[in-house]
């Protein structure tokens, strides 16, 4: 459903080049992966240590892309989608199971505002966007008829997935980048590099804070900056990827209930215990109206802190610090 670089959305990780511990230095790496730029920053004792960790982290991301991408024709995800409507319960790998389970939970929790079966619609809208138009209503309805998380069945005992309706297609674009960032950070930590950040096109997994700091400075919106560590962050918005058709601006973020690109200009930043959760909830929160999002947060006061549009800097900082207590912070701007 998204994703842009953090800087492009006004949500930039301001990697502190001047902050170093006595025995560590800052090293940065960047690679084109997952259809975006993946940036890694680590503090390490020497360049060899940093390079070895980053190389393995990038390799882990490549392995996940080969499993989870719907753009890769022979990916595990593509194979699973090819069985739609056959009634076949397909055994899936641990990685795919982790993401599908989290995606299904998010779909259920948000009443379908996040939906991992959105593939028929995302493909249709990508085709239309290349022609600077919107899909005809009859084509949108045909695609929408093949979408619905309730038609995805997961069997935890056998670790299988079944797509009930013919023509269903999975699209994990609104959650897989966050998972990849989390997994890459785990690799860095296994190399003894706990002070690290992985930015997968704006979905960020933040490790321990650099020495002598409270956290990694993260900018939210045009002005507010907070320091965060040991959590995940993601920003989703309709502002920077869209098409204009007959005077209406349609976002690349689609509403799974209507099959239409969002037309509002709102941006949402989420901080959560993991980048995977932040990624998926940022997507879902973008689809929710202000009233629905407020109600969603109000019904989960022990889990979610919401700073609605126009909140002051202290409210924003309080919500984004929620991850320190294992909670979720959502900021609308």
Image (tube, rainbow, N blue to C red):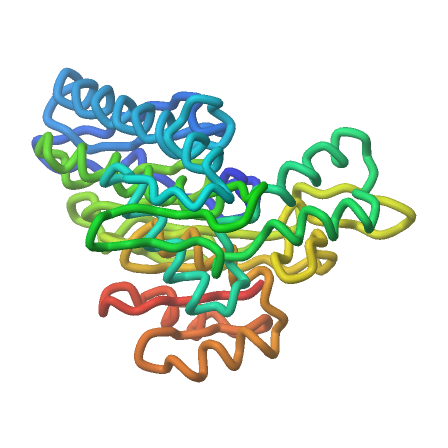
Give the left or right position of residue 110, taking residue 209 as reference: right
Q: Residue furthest right?
A: 246
Residue 173 appears at what percent x and percent y? 48, 41
Q: Nearer the viewer, residue 105 or 239?
A: 105
Answer yes or no: is residue 160 visible: yes
Q: Residue at x 37, y 62 (%)?
A: 105
Q: Nearer the viewer, residue 72 or 14?
A: 72
Quadrant hosting residue 120: top right
Front residue of 304 and 179: 179
In the image, residue 107 sits, relative to residue 136, either above or below, namely below
Task: Give coordinates of residue 250: x percent, y percent.
Answer: 75, 49
Residue drawn where x is 60% and y is 61% of the image: 287
* Residue situated in front as seen by the camera: 156 or 297: 156
Quarter of the rendering containing residue 128: top right
> Above or below — where is 244 with respect to 298?
above
x, y percent for residue 122: 62, 42
Image quarter where the C terminus lies is bottom right
Horizontally, residue 212 falls left or right of residue 166, namely left
Q: Is residue 188 left or right of residue 111?
A: left
Question: Is residue 291 shown above or below 106?
Answer: below
The residue positioned 51% from the left and 27% from the top of the image is 71
Residue 119 on image: x %, y %: 57, 42
- In terms of image quadrants, where is residue 291? bottom right
Q: Is residue 6 visible?
A: no
| Depicted 294 relative to depicted 104: above or below | below
């Amino acid at each position: 459903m998204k994703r842009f670089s953090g800087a492009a959305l006004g949500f930039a990780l301001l990697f502190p080049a001047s902050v170093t511990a006595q025995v560590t230095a800052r090293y940065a790496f960047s690679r084109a992966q997952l259809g975006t730029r993946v940036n890694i920053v680590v503090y390490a004792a020497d360049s060899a240590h940093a390079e070895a960790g980053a190389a393995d982290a990038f390799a882990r991301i490549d392995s996940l892309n080969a499993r989870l991408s719907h753009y890769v024709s022979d990916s595990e995800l593509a194979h699973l989608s090819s069985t739609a409507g056959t009634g076949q319960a397909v055994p899936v790998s641990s990685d795919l199971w982790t993401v599908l389970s989290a995606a299904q939970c998010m779909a259920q929790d948000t009443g379908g505002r996040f939906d991992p079966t959105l593939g028929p619609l995302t493909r249709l809208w990508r085709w239309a966007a290349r022609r600077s138009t919107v899909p005809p209503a009859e084509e949108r309805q045909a695609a929408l008829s093949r979408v619905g998380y309730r038609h995805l069945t997961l069997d935890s005992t056998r670790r299988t997935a079944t797509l009930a309706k013919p023509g269903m297609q999975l699209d994990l674009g609104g959650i897989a980048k966050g998972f990849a960032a989390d997994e890459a950070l785990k690799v860095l930590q296994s190399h003894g590099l706990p002070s690290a950040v992985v930015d997968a096109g704006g979905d960020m997994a933040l490790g321990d804070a650099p020495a002598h700091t409270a956290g990694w400075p993260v900018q939210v919106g045009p002005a507010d900056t907070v320091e965060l560590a040991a959590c995940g962050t993601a920003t989703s918005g309709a502002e920077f990827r869209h098409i204009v058709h007959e005077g209406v601006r349609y976002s690349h973020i689609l509403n799974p209930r209507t099959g239409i690109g969002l037309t509002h200009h709102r941006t949402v930043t989420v901080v959560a215990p993991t980048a995977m959760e932040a990624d998926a909830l940022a997507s879902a929160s973008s689809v929710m109206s202000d009233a629905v999002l407020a109600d969603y947060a109000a019904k989960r006061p022990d889990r979610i802190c919401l700073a609605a549009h126009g909140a002051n800097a202290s409210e924003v900082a309080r919500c984004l610090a929620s991850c320190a207590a294992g909670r979720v912070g959502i900021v609308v701007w």
